[in-house]
Image (cartoon, helix red, strand yellow):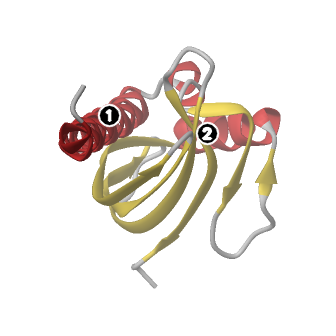
Amino acid sequence: MEWRKVPILILLTLSANACAGRANVRADEEAIRALLGGWGRAATAGDVDALMKYYVAEPAKLGPGRPAMEGADAVRSMFTGVLAGATIKTELIPQDIRVSGDLAVARGVQTGVATPKAGGPASELHVKWVGVYVRQADGSWRCAYDIWNSDVP
């Protein structure tokens, strides 16, 4: 091979790798968007088992005005209690997703309505959140840290 062609081959190889890496990031972002959509559908359906599939085996959920909920049992118990008391119609809307290797961070808003099952007025949900996601051995993404607080006083 002629030595003058080597820089061109290196440049072409680097360009192809950069494009492939960005395509993978886009696929990862879309996978996280799909995961977030599944969370909203599971919460709206009142399906605690489906909600737990959103999380790693031992997640931490950090909400306002209470100690962190650490571990699957604590998170499951919280969801069971909330969904026993209210019917929820909600969605998570990601505003920014950043992927770096096997970790990702997303932030966004949650909107919706919670209606008490015992009667009474419904409450609008206006929440902002940040999630930290970890790629699993099968390539899927799961939430390790779920941090949120409400815009409603």
Counting from the top left corner in percent of width and height, residue 61 is at 67, 53
Q: Residue furthest top?
A: 138
Q: Say which amino acid is labelled 2.
A: Phe
Counting from the top left corner in percent of width and height, residue 31 is at 34, 31
Q: Which mark is residue 67?
A: none
Q: Say which amino acid is labelled 1.
A: Asn
Q: Report which quarter residue 68 is drawn in.
A: bottom right
Residue sitting nearer the eye, 40 or 121: 40
Q: Residue at horizontal 74%, vertical 37%? A: 77
Q: Residue at horizontal 71%, vertical 41%? A: 75
Counting from the top left corner in percent of width and height, residue 145 is at 64, 52
Within 10 Å of disc 1 (Cα), the crowding (few <14, some 14-19, many 20+) is some
Judging by the rendered image, the residue that carries numbered circle 1 is: 24
Where does the N terminus fall, quadrant-wise? Answer: top left
Q: Residue at horizontal 56%, vertical 39%? A: 102
Q: Residue at horizontal 79%, vertical 42%? A: 74
